[in-house]
Amino acid sequence: MDTIIKKLALLLFVCFCLTAQGQENIVDRLNKTLGVRLPAEYEVRVKTFVDTNSVMKDEDAAAFTEQYITKEMGTDWNIDKQNQLLFIWHYIYKQVTDKDLYIGNGGNTQLESDFNNRGVNIRIRVGGERYKNEIIAYMKQLSAEAQQRSAEAQQRSAEAQQRSAEAQQRSEEAKQRSEEAKQRSEEAIKSIMHTDSLWIKNHMEKFYNTYKEAPEIVRPEDISFMKNSAKEIIASCKKHNIDYRAILLKEVGDEKKVEAILKFYGVE
């Protein structure tokens, strides 16, 4: 039974230590950093203060206070370091809560003597004002920096939206240019088709008839020119899906003559 109780006690102690480590606050960290700790009764009050006070619960304010105390403890007040730490916490506590941390009782004559020392008393009053001014300035600076970051983020967001709008506008303009180019291309094709159709109607049969009826008046260079032209026109018709045979057939009305004309020009 004793063994079981000892094991339970050990387990509870370990759990307590783990819980205490998880709840480390400014006071605990300063104890490690400074190698000095507050008197036991004041340590409890200060721990409660830093854990419950809205100012001290702010991470930035707590970090500033920790650095401030570390720096102040680096100065020499010519008194016991434990008393110096208490008096620094005293004026911080006073500035934040408007109440006194150290109230002079407890029977510690050296502590009371140090507190009433004129030089120490001046340090407490001056230190309290300095802490108040510096933490206010620090928090204002953080607020201003946060506002600046927010403004910059909004500016970047606005610029991104502007770039997006400009990109969308460029995309729309490119799309419009593409449509216009397509339209111009279609119109050009129609024009080509119309021109090719007219050439087939107006030249292929007429030149062929002239050659057949009066070959003596047709020069060799004219024949060569017309055949080359016909090949180009027919190639264009094929490219643009123009039914050149139908056009010729409509003009001459005879399938055999269409074959003869195409053979003459050497396009089929």
Image (cartoon, rainbow, N blue to C red):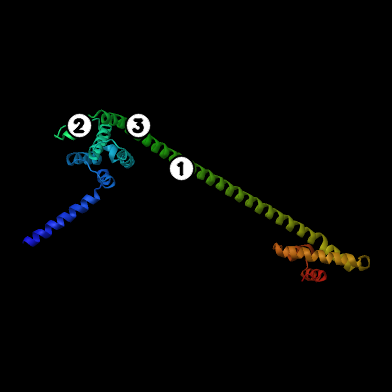
Quadrant of the rendering where the N terminus is positioned? bottom left
Disc 2/disc 1 C-alpha distance (Å): 55 Å
Q: Give left or right: position of 146 versus 29.
A: right
Mark in front: 3 vs 1: 3
Mark before the other along the chain sequence, 3 or 2: 2
Contact check, label 2 and label 1, Cβ < 8 Å: no
Query: Image check: 37 left or right of 208?
Result: left
Which one is closest to the eye, mark 2 or mark 1? 2
Sequence-first disc among 3 and 1? 3
In the orientation shown, which residue stands out farthest toward the right?
216
Q: Nearer the viewer, residue 108 or 93?
A: 108
Between 76 and 210, which is closer to the camera in this rendering? 76
Type of amino acid under label 3 = Asn
The residue that label 2 is drawn on is 113
Classify mark 3: helix, strand or loop.
Answer: helix
Mark with earlier residue (2, 1) = 2
